[in-house]
Amino acid sequence: MELTRRDAMAIGACAVVATAVPFQASAATEAAMAFTGGAEPTEGGVTLTTPEIAENGNTVPIAVDAPGAVAIIIIAEGNPDPKTAEVAFGPMAGAQSISMRIRLAGTQNVVAIAKMADGSFVQASNAVKVTIGGCGG
Amino acid sequence: MISRRDFLQATVAASAIYGASGVGNWAKLAAQQALTQDQLLNFDTFGNITLIHITDIHAQMKPTYFREPEINLGLGDVKGMPPHVTGADFLKMFNIKPGTPEAYALTYVDFTSLAKTYGKMGGIDRIATVVNAIRADRPDALLLDGGDTWHGSYTCLKTQGQDVVNLFNRLKPDAMTFHWEFTLGSDRIREIIEGLEFPAMGQNIYDNEWNEPSEDFVDYEFFERGGAKIAVIGQAFPYMPIANPGWMFPEYSFGIHDERMQEMVDEVRAAGADLVVCLSHNGFDVDRKMASKVKGIDIILTGHTHDALPEPVLVGETMLIASGSNGKFVTRLDLDVRDGKLMGFRHKLIPIFSDVIAAEPEMTAALEAERAPFKDELEEVIGKTDSLLYRRGNFNGTWDDLICNALIDEREADIALSPGFRWGPSMMPGQDITREDLYNATAMSYPNSYRSEMSGEQIKIILEDVADNLFNPDPYYQQGGDMVRVGGMGYHIDVSKPQGSRLSNMTMLKTGEAIDPAKNYVVAGWASVREGTEGPAIFDVVENYIKRKGTVHVDPNKSVMVTGA
C-alpha cells in the first residue's frame, strides 16, 4: 500500500493527525493592528463561541455576538493568512452577531475583535484544538 | 437555618457514620462474613423520589470479572481528587478495609485472590433483581441509562445491538443517552430509537448540516414523581466524531455546548421543574467542570470514564454520581424534593455480586434465548491464559499487551498500537479464553487492523496528540479514554508538560536503540477512525495468535516511565 505522509498520519492511533501550528505573530498582529489602528482592545463585551475540539478542522462552526458593535474581525492566529473575516453592521442591523464556518490549519487561538460605536475595541479569544483524537471510554 | 449545601454535606457524614451508605453497610457485612442479597439491597426508603442509574454496561449481559485501574492520574485542579484516586489511597479515602467485598469491587488491590473469594460481578438478570427490588420499595422509581449500552460483545456485534436492546427493554428504562451506540451507524441507531418506549436524549446532539439541535433526539423530558416535577436533560458523549469514526454518523455533530445546557436548565426551571437531573456521558472531569459553569443542575448522573464512587461528589450545589461500568454497580439515589428544592438524599452504590444476588428467572430465560443462536461460537475455547488479563490503567493493561503482541507477531510489525479503551472485562490466570471473552475486549464495528510505515517523527506526533487528549489540564480538551497502548517500543512521559514535549526516550525494545525520527518503522494497529482502513479484523488477528500459542503469557509491562504526576 502506497501512503502519502498525510495518509500515514491519518491512519495512526485512532484518527486524523494535524500538528499544532505556531503562532503567526507578525501576520496576526498586523491584521489586528490594521483593524484597531493600534488601539488596545479590552476583554469582555463580545462573546465568541467555538468548539473546544474541532470535529473537522476544515469546517469549524464559530459564532460572535457583540451587542452595539459597528464591525467585527475574526483572526485565526495560526492560519497562513490569519485574517479570516471582517463584517460591518449598518445602523439598521437588528443584531450585531454573526455565525460562520472557518478552516483551521491546526490547534490555535481564534480571536474576535469588535469595534464599538464609540470607537473603542473589545475582544475575545478561544483556543480550538484540531486533533487526531483519542479513544474515548 | 441550615443551608442546602450544609444539609447535603451533613447527610454524607451521617451516612458514613450510621451505615446508610453502601460503604458503611459493606464493611459491616464483611465483618460479619455474611454477604446476603437482602443486606446488599437493604435501603431505608427516603424522601419522595428514587433514581436508579446504570451506565457503560458495554453489552456485558453475563457476570464478569472487572479489575479497576491501578493508575488513573488527575492533573491540575483535580490532582488527588476522586476519581483520580486508586488502590490503597482509594481504600483510605473512603475508609474501606483491604480484603473486604467493597475493596474487591472498587479497587485493583489483591484482585486475583479476592476474585476467587467474591466471584464475578454484574449480569443483566442480577440487575433485573435489583431494579425489581427497588421498584418494590418505590414503584415509580426512574431508571436512567447513561449509554455505552449497545456495544461491546459478540452477540451485540452480530445482532447490531438488538440483543441488548431487547434485554434492556425488559428493564423498562425511562430515558437514555449515547456514545458507542453511534458506531452502529446513524441509520441503525435511528431504527432502534424509533422502536423505544422511552426518550433518546442529548441536548448536545446537533444536525451537522445546519449546526442546530437535531430533531432525532430530545433535549429533556419531564417526569411527575412523588408530587414533584423532575426534568431529565440528556448530554451525549461530546467528542463522537473525533474519538470514533465520524463517517459512520455524518449527519450529527456533538460538543459540550454548556451555554445551551444553561438554556435548557433555565427552560425547565421556568416550566416548573422542582428537580433538574442531567443524564450525562461527558466523563467525570468534564461533568465536574460543567457543574461549575452551568447553574441550576441538582444532580449529574455521570458516565463515560467508568468511575465507581461510593459517595456523591459535590460541586457547588450540584451532586455528581458515578456508577461504574460493565454492570458491576447500580446506583440507587433517594431524594426528598419539596417546594422546588432538593432537601436531602440517601445514596447507595449497589455492588452486583453475581453469586450473592439471585438471577431474575424471566430475564435469565430471555438472555439465554438471545444467546442460543450463537451458543457454539460463543463457547468455543480458543486458548488459555496463565496471566491476569485486564484493560484499565492510563498507560497499559495486560489485555492490550496481548493484543499488541499478537499484532507484532501476526502482522510482522516493529511497533503495535492499541487504543486506550476503558471497556472490556478481565480474565483470571488459568482461565480458558473463549471466543466470547476475546470479543468482550475487541468487538466493534470498525475492527480492521492496519499495517503501515511511519517515521519515528510521525509516531511521536501521534503519541503526543493522544497524550494531550488525556493530560490536557483543561477537562474540556480531554476525551476520557486512556493513552494509546504501545507494543515493541518504550518511552518516557512527563504528563505535566505541554503537548509536543511530554514524550522522550522513545526506544525499540528488541534492540534497545533510540527511535530515529527520520527512519521508517512498520506499525500495526486497530480501530482507526479513518474510512476504508484495510486489514484483517482485530478479533481474527488475536484469535489466530492465541490458537497458535495455546496458552498465552503476558509479562508485566515496564516500558512506560511516567513522571510529572
Image (cartoon, coloured by chain):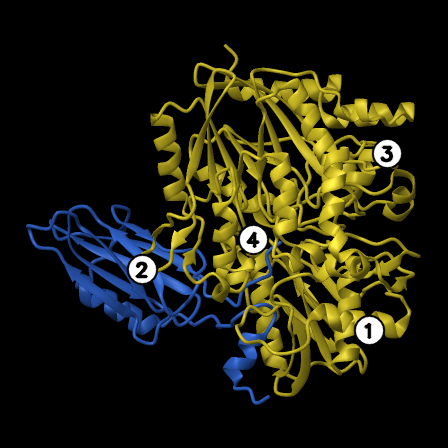
Chain colours: A blue, B yellow
Dot 1 or dot 4, earlier in sequence: 4
**Dot 3 falls on which chain?**
B
**Dot 2 falls on which chain?**
A
Residue indicated by mark 3: B100
Mark 3 or mark 2, whichever is nearer to me? 3
Mark 3 or mark 4, whichever is nearer to me? 4
**Dot 1 falls on which chain?**
B
Marks 3/4: CA–CA distance: 35 Å
Marks 3/2: CA–CA distance: 55 Å
| Disc 1 secondary structure class | helix
Going 72% across and 22% down the picture, which residue do you hit? B16
Q: Is residue B153 visible?
A: no
A135 and B212: which is toward the camera? B212
In the rendered structure, which amino acid carries the disc numbered 3? Thr
Tell me, for residue B545, which label it has, or none: 1
Asked if marks 3 and 2 touch (Cβ < 8 Å), the reply is: no
Residue A27 falls left or right of residue B411: left
| Disc 2 secondary structure class | strand
B117 and A125: which is toward the camera? B117
Dot 3 or dot 1, earlier in sequence: 3
Residue indicated by mark 2: A111
Label 3 in the same subunit as label 4: yes
Marks 1/2: CA–CA distance: 52 Å
Marks 1/4: CA–CA distance: 29 Å
Tell me, for residue B181, which label it has, or none: 4
Going 24% across and 65% down the picture, which residue do you hit? A32
In the rendered structure, which amino acid carries the disc numbered 4? Glu
**Dot 4 falls on which chain?**
B
